[in-house]
């Protein structure tokens, strides 16, 4: 045992990896349907291992924290800048109200109970499950001109207060938004969802490597037997389906295969390859003729591609308008915004940075990609030039400070990394030929980056964690509950009775503004629908920025 302790103290990198392993294991533990998660798991693991008095260089946590913040900004950048547009101002207003209320309530409670700066920052971070506050507030405290022992005590109080209030904040916000808020609004979430879903599409998310047996878009072969179609063009045949999106892709005439165009003429007895949604094509025999099995005719090269929308001329068009302009021969399988799959209908508008998963014959897919934007083809390479420059430029910007009302405010270099991620993420959505970060690499930056930072924070705080918890006492639990629930209560009432938001979208927006993905999932379960995500993406982007900025601000206010 002595060898083990000496090894960890002499080689703190081993303590970091042990903290990650134990933390991810603790994060998997469940209490009912509630899991602690990797953030709390690694914090608790760090505190436990930190009892061995292990000293980890502070640069380690700063590097991983900057990677995490850049990744966060990179993901939300397109939606953040979209949130500044006129058509998203309602959701932006709700987010600002919720985040300002959160800061006000946390600051007021900390002052009334005479908490120090570290406890106040940890209270805000935990109640809103916003781990970035730990880093930005810690940077701000490190810059203060105070005695070293006081600085160390306040820095160690941040993770202590965070650990206590995180559990309270997560559990009660999830419960409030999915159960209590709908009752306050006197609404049935499932009924609201059914009303909105009448024209929506989009399947449920499945396990990795598992796909649904139901495919919306299908390709079938039919022998023309309807005399009214003899001598008609392909465009006229497609018009027989009453405005439905039906495409004739190929024609067999005897042994000849003809690639169909809108002006191609079909004859009685021809066999045609028809692409349409399954719900339309099941009745195609009544319009066309008998379905046949013609492997050669149907052996078309079909492509499924993720396309990033970058064409400014297409932004804010509806899917119906986009289909008329550029959608011939192409079907939409999935619409992803801000990493979340969005239910879609004909009237759904598209935004820059949206990922459209399209399917169809390869010639049509390639043509659509050239107009829509950029094909996001799978690759394992990360543009580290892009990442490195983004963090450096953002960090330099974050070091700038401004004095407001006697308070010296700065984002710190870590907050600047978040800004760098925002700008570079937006640039990636506009010019996706550079700056690619594949999903696996983004997961490492995001999840492992944050977990490593939190784990090192726990290791540093370990020796004084228990003493800090004794000092604040049980009061911190009840204060955390008030700080977590009050802003959401204010936002729900403001969104419904002032902004007149739809309840389903409103609750999704509250979960986004509070950066609580767990609450979004609970609301979706309560509504038996994915529709609340429509209100989640813009508030999540804005909420991440504001709450991160609150870290140094609450330190300045408490000073």
Image (spheres, rainbow, N blue to C red):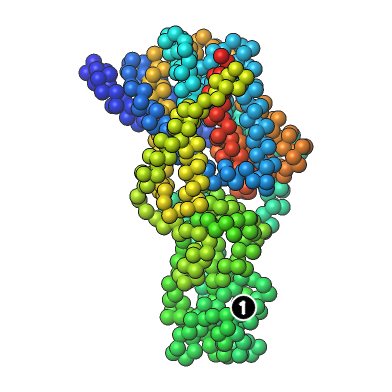
Q: Which residue is mark 1?
A: 238
Q: In the image, residue 510 lies at what x, y percent?
A: 64, 37
Depicted 507 relative to depicted 6: above or below? below
**Does any portion of residue 46 appear in the rendered image?**
no
Depicted 431 relative to depicted 115: above or below? below
Name the one closer to the observer, 229 or 30: 229
Q: Secondary structure at mark 1?
A: helix
401 lies left or right of 456: right
Name the one closer to the observer, 550 or 344: 550
Q: In the image, residue 91 lies at what x, y percent?
A: 66, 41
383 lies left or right of 108: left
Q: Residues within 10 Å of mark 1 (few under 14, many from 20)?
A: some
Name the one closer to the observer, 326 or 495: 326
Where does the C terminus fall, quadrant-wise?
top right
Q: In the image, residue 280 lies at what x, y percent?
A: 62, 71
Q: Residue at x 63, y 55 (%)?
A: 316
Q: Residue at x 63, y 26 (%)?
A: 102
Q: In the image, residue 419 lies at what x, y percent?
A: 50, 36
Depicted 427 relative to depicted 5: above or below? below
**Does any portion of residue 461 appear in the rendered image?**
yes
Q: Residue at x 76, y 42 (%)?
A: 500
Q: Residue at x 70, y 30 (%)?
A: 490
Choose top left, top right, bottom left or bottom right for residue 277.
bottom right
């Amino acid at each position: 045992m002595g060898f083990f302790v000496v090894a960890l103290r002499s080689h703190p990198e081993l303590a970091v990896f042990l903290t990650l392993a134990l933390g991810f294991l603790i994060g998997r533990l469940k209490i009912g349907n509630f899991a602690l998660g990797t953030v709390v798991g690694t914090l608790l693991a760090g505190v436990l291992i930190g009892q061995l008095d292990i000293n980890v260089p502070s640069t380690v946590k700063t590097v991983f924290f900057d990677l995490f913040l850049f990744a966060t900004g990179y993901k939300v950048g397109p939606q953040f800048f979209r949130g500044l547009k006129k058509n998203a101002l309602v959701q932006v207003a709700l987010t600002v109200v919720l985040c300002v209320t959160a800061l006000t309530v946390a600051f007021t409670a900390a002052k009334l109970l005479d908490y120090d700066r570290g406890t106040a920052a940890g209270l805000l971070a935990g109640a809103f499950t916003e781990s970035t506050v730990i880093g930005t507030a810690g940077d701000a405290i490190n810059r203060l001109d105070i005695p070293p022992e006081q600085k160390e005590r306040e820095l160690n109080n941040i993770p202590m207060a965070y650990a206590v209030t995180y559990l309270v904040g997560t559990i009660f916000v999830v419960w409030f938004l999915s159960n209590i808020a709908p009752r306050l609004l006197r609404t049935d979430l499932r009924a609201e969802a059914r009303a909105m879903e009448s024209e929506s599409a989009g399947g449920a998310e499945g396990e990795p490597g598992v796909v649904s047996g139901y495919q919306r878009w299908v390709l079938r072969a039919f022998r023309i037997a309807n005399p009214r179609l003899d001598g008609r063009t392909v465009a006229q045949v497609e018009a027989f389906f009453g405005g439905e999106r039906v495409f004739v892709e190929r024609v067999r005439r005897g042994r000849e295969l003809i690639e169909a165009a809108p002006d191609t003429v079909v004859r009685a007895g021809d066999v045609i390859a028809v692409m349409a949604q399954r719900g339309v094509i099941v009745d195609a025999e009544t319009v066309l003729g008998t379905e046949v099995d013609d492997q050669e005719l149907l052996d078309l090269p079909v492509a499924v591609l993720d396309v990033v929308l970058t064409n400014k001329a297409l932004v804010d068009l509806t899917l119906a308008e986009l289909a008329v302009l550029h959608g011939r021969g192409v079907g939409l399988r999935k619409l992803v915004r801000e990493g979340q799959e969005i239910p879609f209908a004909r009237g759904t508008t598209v935004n820059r940075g949206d990922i459209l998963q399209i399917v169809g014959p390869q010639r049509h897919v390639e043509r659509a990609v050239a107009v829509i934007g950029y094909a996001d083809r799978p690759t394992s390479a990360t543009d580290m030039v892009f990442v490195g420059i983004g963090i450096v430029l953002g960090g330099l910007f974050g070091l700038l400070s401004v004095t407001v009302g006697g308070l010296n405010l700065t984002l710190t270099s870590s907050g600047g990394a978040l800004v760098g991620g925002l700008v570079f993420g937006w640039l990636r959505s506009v010019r996706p030929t550079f700056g690619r970060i594949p999903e696996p690499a983004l997961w490492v930056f995001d999840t492992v980056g944050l977990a490593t930072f939190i784990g090192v924070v726990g290791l540093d705080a370990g020796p004084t964690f228990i003493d800090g918890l004794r000092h604040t006492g049980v009061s911190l639990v009840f204060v955390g509950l008030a700080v977590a629930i009050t802003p959401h209560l204010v936002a729900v009432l403001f969104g419904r009775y002032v902004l007149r938001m739809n309840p389903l979208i409103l609750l999704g927006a509250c979960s986004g503004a509070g950066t609580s993905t767990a609450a979004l999932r609970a609301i979706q379960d309560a509504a038996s629908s994915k529709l609340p995500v429509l209100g989640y993406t813009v508030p999540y982007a804005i909420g991440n920025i504001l709450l991160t900025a609150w870290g140094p601000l609450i330190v300045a206010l408490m000073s």
